[in-house]
Image: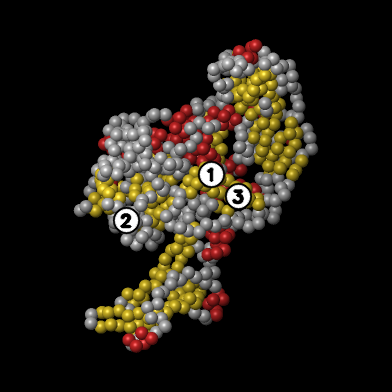
Amino acid sequence: MKITNVDKGKAYHLSSDTMLQVERPNLFFNEYGEQTNPVSLPDTDANREILDYPDIMARKQKPSASIVATIEDDGYFMACRQAVLSAKRKESIETSFYMNEGSFLSKISETPLSEVFGTETIPGLSTVEQCIDFCRSLISGNNPEYAIFPVLIESDRTSSSGSPKFDYINRYGFMVDGTFYDSLNTPLTGTPDFYNAVPRTVTDGDTVINLAAGYYMSPFIRGNYLLKRILSYFGYTLKDNFFTRTTPFPDMVFINNCADTLISGSIRITDLLPDCSCNTILDVYRKKFCCEFIPNEVGHTIDIILLNEILDLPSQVDLDAYLVSRINIEYPESYKQLILSSEEQISSPQEVETFDSIADLYGKYKQLHIDPLDGAFYRQGYYFWVLFGDMTVLRINDKVAESYMKYCAGGDLDTHEISVPDCQPVMLHNNLNDAEDVFPYIGAANFLNSKLMADNTAEEEPSSDASTTTDVKLNPMLAFAYTDHGYPRGTISNYARNLSSDSSDPYIRLWDYTLTYNGNDGIFEKFYRRLDNIYRNSMHSVTADFLLPVNLKQSLSPYLPVSLNGEKLLLNILKYNLGGGLQPLETSFYTYRLYEPVSSAKSFSDYNTSTGYMWEVKQVKTTLTEEQYNNSPYKDKQFVLAFLPPATKENAESGKRYFVQHTALSYQFGNYIYYNEFEVWFVAVKISDV
C-alpha cells in the first residue's frame, strides 16, 4: 500500500502491517461521509517533515485538517483528504483519511457562506440608480442568478380596526392620481415601477422619515446559482440535476430581509445571503427534499440525487459471490413514521393553534381545507349579516393552523424526526388599495448599510454600526418566483388567482410542487411518502461479512440498490480494508420492500371524504310591533359565527333543525322605523337533491 501527500509530492513511510479500515456510509441514513478509522503513521523523520513536524509545539501554523492525499493498494486508487489528529514523538502520528463524500463534507464543514463571496458585488453597478435599474431588469424573470418580488415585513402600524399593517420590500405597481396600485385585480397601466424607486417618506407616529430612492428594495439569489457558487468555491462543478431541470425549482430563491441593499450604490452579495454555513445550505436541500450530494473526486463534479429516484433503480451488483458469513436480520422493536418540520418559524401576525399531528387537527375540526394560495388550514363557517331588513348569509374561512405546521400523521407508531435548518415564510392575505392579494411575510427587516435616524432623515453613507436591527438573524427562507400579469410575485404554494372572467375556477395551477410540508403537493407527499412507507413497513437491519474485490471497494456506491439472496437492499454502512491482506468485514444494509400487512399514512384527500350530505341554511323574517321588539328576548342579539361538523345521513333523516339563532332588530328608513325578528337554522340535505 502506498499513501502519498500530493501537496508535498512525497509518499509516507508505512509500517509493514499498516492497514486502513474504511467505512462508506449511506448519507440518507448517516451524518458522516466515507472515511478511515484513525491510523498510526510511524513517527519517522520523513513523515514528520512531510507533515510539517506536527509533534513540535513551537510550530507557528495549525496542523492542516485538509491535506490532499492519494491511497494506492493492489489496483485500488483513491484521492482523499487527510487530517492529522495527534502526534507523539518517537512513537506515532495519528491521522484519518476522508474519501468521496467524506472528503467533500470535510471541505465544506463549518465554512461560513459569506466566505464564498467575500466582498464581491453584482458587477456593473456603481450608483443607486444603476442598482434600481438592475432590479427592474429582474421583473421579466429571465436572469439566471437573481429574481425579485414583493415581500411583507413587520411594522408597528395598525389599521383602524386594530389589525396589523405591513411594510414592503420590493413593492411594485403604478401610481394614478397619488394612489399606488399593486393588486393583480388592477391591470398594469402607464409605467409600472417599484414604489421605492423614487424618494419617499415614512410616517412613524408623529415622526416623518425621508427615504432616498432605493430603500426597501433587494434582489433575491436563486437557489441553483447559490449551490453552483458554493460548490465552485470548493473546486466542484454542479451537474444537471432534478433542481435544474424540474419546474419550478430553477425559479426557487433564498429570500433576504435587507431593506437597504441598494443604498451604498452597489449590491454586496453577502447582503442577500442567510446567516449560516455552506453546509447548512446543503442540509436545507438534503433534508427538505430527501436528496443527497454525490461527489466525483476524480472529475470534481457534484450530482444531486433524490431518494425517490434511487428506489426506482435496478440493483448495481449482486453481492452473493462475495458473501463469507451467514446473514443476520434484525427486526425493529417498533416500526416508525416520519415527522418533518423546519427548525425556525416566522411569528405569524395571526395567532392560531398548534397541533402535534394531522390526526389531532382533523380530530378537532373534522372538516378542513388547505387554502391553495397560502397553504394554511381553514375551516368553513357562516356569517349572518342584516342590513335594512334583509339578511345575507356569507361563507367565511377561518384559519386554524399555519402553512408551516409540521408534518406528522399521528397515531401510535414511534417517530423518526427530520428537522430542516430553514425558516418557512408565511403567505398573508394583505388588503391593498384596490383589492386583497397574497404575499410572503418574512418578519422583521435588517438594515445593513445605513440607519434610519430619529431626526427625520435617512443616513446616506454606510455606517459600520448602522443596522437598526442587527439582532435579526436571517435563516434560510425558500420561495418560488414567478410573474403574474406583469407583476412579480413570490409564493410557497403552487396556485395563483384566476383573473379570467371566462372561467369559474378561482385558481390556476402553476406547477406540481409546494414548499409546505402538508397537502397533496407538499413536501411529504412529493419527497417523503415512499421513505415513510419504508419506515412503517420495512427498514429491517441486515448484516453480513464480505470479501470485496478491488473494483467494488473503489466503485460500489453507498446509495444505489444492491442484491443479496435475491432481495434488493439499500446499503447502510459498507466496510472494507486496505493493506494487511484479505480480511472479511461486516457490512450493514436496510430492507426497503414493504412487508405485509402494509401500513400507510392517510393522504390529505382521505381526510375530507364526502358524506354525500350538506348543510342548507333556512331563515324566517317576522314583522314586529315596537312593543314586541322591546319585549323580545332576542332584542339586538348578535348572531354568532356558525361552524358545523360535516352533515350526515343521520342528520338529514332526523329532520331536526341545527344551530338555531334568533335576533330582533330595528332600522329607520326615511321617517319610518321598522321592527323585525329573524330566525336562522340549518338542515342536512342530500347533495344529489340540491
Residue 64 position (above or below residue 343): above
- Give me the C-alpha separation between circle 2 and circle 1: 33 Å
**First in residue order: circle 2 vs circle 1:** 1
In the image, farthest residue toward the top: 45
* Amino acid at dot 1: Val
Residue 492 x, y percent position in the rendering: 44, 49
Q: Which residue is tagged 3?
A: 338
**First in residue order: circle 3 vs circle 2:** 3
Residue 349 position (above or below residue 556): below
Residue 217 x, y percent position in the rendering: 33, 42
Q: How many marks?
A: 3
Q: Does the rendering let one see residue 189?
A: no
Near-viewer residue (275 or 654):
275
Helix, strand or loop at label 1? It is strand
Residue located at (63% from left, 17% from top)? 55
Q: Which residue is tagged 1?
A: 420
302 relative to 558 in the view: left or right: left
* Viewer-side label of 3, 1: 1
Are circles 2 and 1 on residues that touch, CB within 8 Å?
no
* Amino acid at dot 2: Leu
Residue located at (60% from left, 50% from top)? 338
Q: Which residue is tagged 2?
A: 432
426 relative to 563 in the view: left or right: left
Label 1 crowding class (10 Å Cα cut-off): few <14, some 14-19, many 20+?
A: many
Residue located at (58% from left, 42% from top)? 307
Q: Does the rendering let one see residue 426?
A: yes
